[in-house]
Image (tube, rainbow, N blue to C red):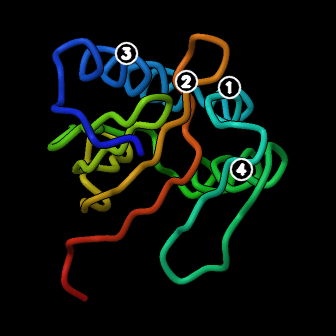
Amino acid sequence: MATLTESTPDIRTEIRKMNDRFETLFALGDASGVASLYTVHGTLLPPGSEAIRGFEGIRNFWQAVMNMGIKQVKLVSVEVEQLTDTTIEQGQYVLSGENEQTLDQGKYMVIWKRHQDQWKLDQDMWNTSLKP
């Protein structure tokens, strides 16, 4: 039976690189590029919505978010734990619009899967910390 290992600088660095890539592709408005960071069976679990699965659904979701005026995503890992080919990340996000105006901020949980020597998002869930 596999057990969780302590978070190592290596896994934190790998996840940071992938989050940097996500942020860059998002800022470029490249929804297809963002969707390519997910596994083939990747799933988004956005608040107030049903699960969204697969490349097309994920691409369409992120394109709609970009079309709403969100220009930038900032991701900050809080905890990263690795279990062989799976990593669990808990973090905080900020979504910004024009002139870096904060539109939303909250927390997220991602299950990463290692695929062909690269980490990919597999399960991605988040919710806002803003009060209505």
* x, y percent for residue 96: 33, 47
Q: Residues within 10 Å of mark 4 (few under 14, many from 20)?
A: many
Mark 3 lies on a secondary structure that is helix
Q: Amino acid at mark 4?
A: Ile
Q: Amino acid at mark 3?
A: Lys
Query: For the residues marked 1 and 2, what is the alpha-carbon distance in whole angstroms?
Result: 6 Å
* x, y percent for residue 109: 36, 55
Counting residues from the N terminus, which is met first, the one under dot 3 or under dot 2? 3
Where is residue 17, by image quadrant?
Answer: top left
Cβ atoms at labels 1 and 4 below 8 Å apart: no
The residue located at (35%, 25%) in the rendering is 15
Q: Is residue 128 above or below residue 39?
A: below
The residue located at (42%, 45%) in the rendering is 1
Counting residues from the N terminus, which is met first, the one under dot 2 or under dot 4? 2
Residue 17 disc label: 3
Query: For the residues marked 1 and 3, what is the alpha-carbon distance in whole angstroms?
Result: 15 Å
Query: For the residues marked 2 and 4, what is the alpha-carbon distance in whole angstroms?
Result: 14 Å
Q: Which residue does the numbered mark 2 point to in the structure image?
A: 25
Q: Residues within 10 Å of mark 2 (few under 14, many from 20)?
A: some
Counting residues from the N terminus, which is met first, the one under dot 1 or under dot 3? 3
Q: Which residue does the numbered mark 1 point to in the structure image?
A: 33
Cβ atoms at labels 1 and 2 below 8 Å apart: yes
Q: Amino acid at mark 2?
A: Leu
The residue located at (42%, 49%) in the rendering is 110
Q: Which residue does the numbered mark 4 point to in the structure image?
A: 58
